[in-house]
């Protein structure tokens, strides 16, 4: 079995879109026609379709929402699912919008952008820990300004027709992609990039591959296995780790929050359990975010019972 | 002679610095796989440390998948890789 097959078997989520190719093309057409003003209204029937006629998809929103809003049932639970699926749909439209119209189509503020730029400019390497929150494409203007090459640990499932933003206009990927299904999960490329002083972006909330490479930390009241590769890399390469959340604050507005900068001392790289307090700081940031923006954490699988 | 000592040195570094306390250097064959279920059983997180250790002790960098796949196959291949890099 290949590394990719192992990872695909181990993970309980998929990056694959639930929409048909024609549905994606329809929305790309609407965006080209009139931007988000035309595309957003068409999201309502799509979201309602998934709520009423695709109970399997609605159920996927319930794993997280039942933890975030325990005890909610009936119409209140239905309304939560509606909001969450609508927010996800809007973020997908925004992602395509950036690809088709360019990043300046969104008004993005980054109050601590200077701090992130200074961290990257220090030349000691920087890990940006991203999460399935908001729309990270909103952060691309700032990532491009970092003046250091940016590498993305990114997996696209086979058959996924949901395009990355740079694919819309036929542009070259502005980032260097590291494939987590490659040899040793792309760790060699990540170490080499950090040693050169580059920036590496890693998703912090989804595990790919072996359970052994994760640690259980309480999230919304119950333990969840979170991946530890980013923390291990930070410790071993003595690299700071910045937790970034790009949040939607208005129809065409985003704010990037630099939730925390975490440094992991080298001596805490082993045994794995010593990384838990640092991981818990990220999870605490995520819980705070879920408290403030409950519908912007796009979790559609049962991460508590993987 | 020099190559043998490099292999022994590598075994010592891997066992001591990756805290593989239950493994004795004498039990480790030069051609045993370092990663995967057979052999030493290291994983991708161990690879992170191993790459940094190689750089720290031998000033040799393993930059990518192609180099790593070949170099990190076994103690022998790692020793060969270090020797070649040092000679170059």
Image (tube, helix red, strand yellow):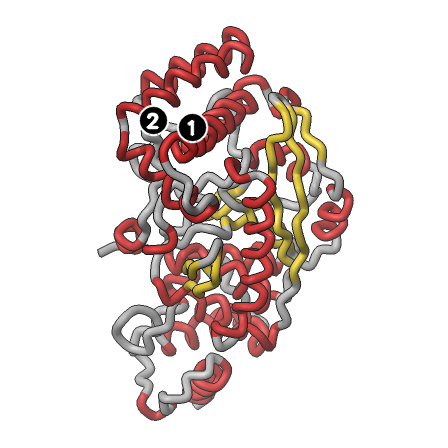
Position above or below: A114 against A182: above
Q: Is residue A252 visible?
A: yes
Identify the disc placed on residue A82: 1
Q: CA distance from mark 1 to mark 2?
A: 7 Å
The residue where tag 2 is placed is A51
Between A140 and B79, the one lying in front of the other is A140
Q: Is residue A156 visible?
A: no
Residue A193 at x, y = what percent?
A: 57, 54
Disc 1 to disc 2: CB gap under 8 Å: yes
Between A192 and A124, the one lying in front of the other is A124
Is disc 1 placed on a helix, strand or loop?
helix
Q: Residue at x 57, y 39 (%)?
A: A293
Q: Say whether residue A285 is left or right of residue B17.
A: right
Badge 1: how crowded within 10 Å, few (<14), some, or many (20+)? some
Q: Residue at x 33, y 86 (%)?
A: B28
Residue A86 at x, y = what percent?
A: 46, 26
Q: Say whether residue A155 is left or right of residue A193.
A: left
Is disc 2 placed on a helix, strand or loop?
helix
Q: Earlier in the sequence, mark 1 or mark 2?
A: 2
Specify the quadrant that holds the N terminus of chain A: bottom left
């Amino acid at each position: 079995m290949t590394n990719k097959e192992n990872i695909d078997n181990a993970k309980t989520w998929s990056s694959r879109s639930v929409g048909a190719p024609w549905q994606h093309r329809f929305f790309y057409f609407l965006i080209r026609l009139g931007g988000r003003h035309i595309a957003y209204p068409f999201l309502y029937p799509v979201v309602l379709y998934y709520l009423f006629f695709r109970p399997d998809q609605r159920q996927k929103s319930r794993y997280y929402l039942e933890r975030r809003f325990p005890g909610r049932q009936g119409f209140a639970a239905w309304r939560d699912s509606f909001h969450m699926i609508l927010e996800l749909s809007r973020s997908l439209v925004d992602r395509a919008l950036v690809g088709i119209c360019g990043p300046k189509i969104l008004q993005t503020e980054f109050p601590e952008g200077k701090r992130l730029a200074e961290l990257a400019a220090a030349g000691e390497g920087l890990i940006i820990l991203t999460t399935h929150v908001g729309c990270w494409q909103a952060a691309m203007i700032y990532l491009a300004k970092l003046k250091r090459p940016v590498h993305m640990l990114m997996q696209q499932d086979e058959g996924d027709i949901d395009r990355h933003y740079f694919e819309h206009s036929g542009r070259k990927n502005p980032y260097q992609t590291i494939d987590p299904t490659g040899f040793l999960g792309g760790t060699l490329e990540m170490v080499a990039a950090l040693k050169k002083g580059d920036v590496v972006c890693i998703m912090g909330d989804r595990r790919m591959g072996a359970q052994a490479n994760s640690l259980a930390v309480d999230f919304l009241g119950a333990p969840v296995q979170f991946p530890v590769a980013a923390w291990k890399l930070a410790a071993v390469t003595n690299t700071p780790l910045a937790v970034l959340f790009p949040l939607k604050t208005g129809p065409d507005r985003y704010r990037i929050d630099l939730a925390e900068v975490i440094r992991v001392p080298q001596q805490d790289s082993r045994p794995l359990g010593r990384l838990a307090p640092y991981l818990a700081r990220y999870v605490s940031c995520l819980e705070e975010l879920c408290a403030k923006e409950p519908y912007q954490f796009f979790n559609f699988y049962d991460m508590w019972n993987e | 002679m020099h190559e043998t000592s490099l292999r022994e040195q590598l075994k010592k570094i891997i066992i001591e610095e990756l805290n593989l306390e239950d493994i004795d250097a004498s039990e480790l064959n030069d051609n045993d796989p370092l990663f995967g279920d057979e052999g030493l059983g290291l994983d991708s997180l161990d690879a992170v440390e191993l790459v940094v250790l190689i750089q720290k002790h031998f000033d040799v960098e393993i930059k990518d998948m192609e180099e790593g796949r070949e170099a990190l196959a076994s103690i022998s291949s790692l020793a060969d890789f270090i020797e070649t890099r040092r000679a170059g």
